[in-house]
Amino acid sequence: MQVNFLLGIAVSSLVAFSGYKKGALSGDGFWGALFVGAAIITFGGWLWFILLLAFFISSSILTRLKKKEKWKVYQKFDKGGERDFIQTLANGGLGAILAICNSFFTGPLWFGAYVGAMATVNADTWATELGVLSRKTPRLITSGSRVPPGTSGGITRAGFMASVSASLLIGFVALIGLFAKTATWQTHLWIALAALVSGTLGSLLDSFLGATKQAMFYCPRCGEETEGRVHSCGERTRMIRGSTWLNNDGVNLISSLFGAVLGALGAYFWAG
C-alpha cells in the first residue's frame, strides 16, 4: 500500500497539474483532485483510477469545446469551467470513500457502486456541456415547458443522448479493465449495464433536483436567473426558489450517491 500511495501522489500530481495548467482546475481544485486521485489509486487500484481519468479527461475536453459559444449560458452557473476544491470533492469524493471501503471490505458491490457514481458524474457533465449547445430549446424535466438554455432542470434530446453515451463510456472502460484481469468478458457484461442504468438515471435525478430543490436566484440588475448568490455582473441576487442549503455541488453529490446505490444493486443482482 505504501508503494501505491507514493505512486498515487506522483501520478495524481501530474494529472492535477496538467488540469490546472489547461484551465480545468482552479488552484484549490488542484489539491482536491490530488487528494481524490491519490486516495483512489492507493485504496482502489489502477482500474479505479483509470475510470476517474476517463471522467476527468472527457469532461474537461467537453468543457473547453466551443467555450465562447457557452459563455452566456455559463453566466447562469454558480461556477465556471474551472473545477474548484468543493467541486472535485462533490464529483470524486464519494469515489474516494468507496475505494477506502473496498480496501477493508473487498467485494463487487464497492466496485459496482464506484462505477455507478463515476457514470453519474460523467453523464451529468456531458449532458450539461453538450446539451447547452443544442439548437433545440430545453424543456423543464418536471413540466415539459420550454426554458432558456442553462436553466437548472432543463433537458434536451442532445443532452440526454450525451448522458447515455457518457454512461456507456464508463461502462466500456470498466468492462475492458475487468477483461484485462480475467481474460473473459461474458461474466462482466453486467458492469456495462450497471453503468448505463446508473449514469442515465443519476443524471435525470440531477436535473429533477435542479428543477425542484436546488437554490436558484434572480439578478435584479440583469433580470436573469442564476445559481449564484452574486451574479457575474457583481450584483447581489435574491433567492426565488429551492432550498437555501442545496447548491449545485450538493445536487451533484446526491445524484452520484444515487448512482452509486444503483451500481451496487447492479453488482448484487448481476455479478453473480
Image (cartoon, rainbow, N blue to C red):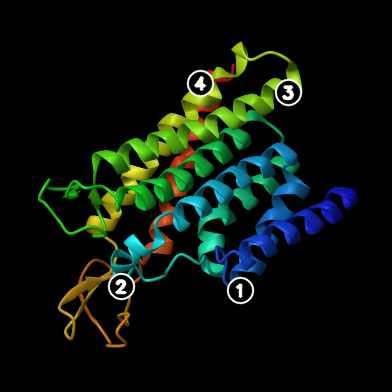
Measure the alpha-carbon separation of dots 2 and 1: 24 Å
Measure the alpha-carbon separation of dots 4 and 2: 38 Å
Label 2 residue SS: loop
Tell me what residue is drawn at x 53 percent, y 43 percent: 118
Label 3 residue SS: helix
In the rendered structure, which amino acid carries the disc numbered 3?
A: Ala
Q: Residues within 10 Å of mark 3 (few under 14, many from 20)?
A: few
Q: Which residue is labeled 1 in the image? A: 28
Measure the alpha-carbon separation of dots 1 and 4: 40 Å
| Numbered label attached to residue 244 | 2
In the rendered structure, which amino acid carries the disc numbered 4?
A: Phe
Mark closest to the chain's N terminus, 1 or 4: 1
In the rendered structure, which amino acid carries the disc numbered 1?
A: Asp
Q: Nearer the viewer, mark 4 or mark 3?
A: 3
Residue 78, image x and y in percent? 37, 71
Query: In the rendered view, does 216 fall on the left or right side of 176?
Result: left
Mark closest to the chain's N terminus, 3 or 2: 3
Residue 119, image x and y in percent? 49, 40
| Numbered label attached to residue 269 | 4
Q: Residues within 10 Å of mark 2 (few under 14, many from 20)?
A: few
Query: In the rendered view, does 222 fall on the left or right side of 196?
Result: left
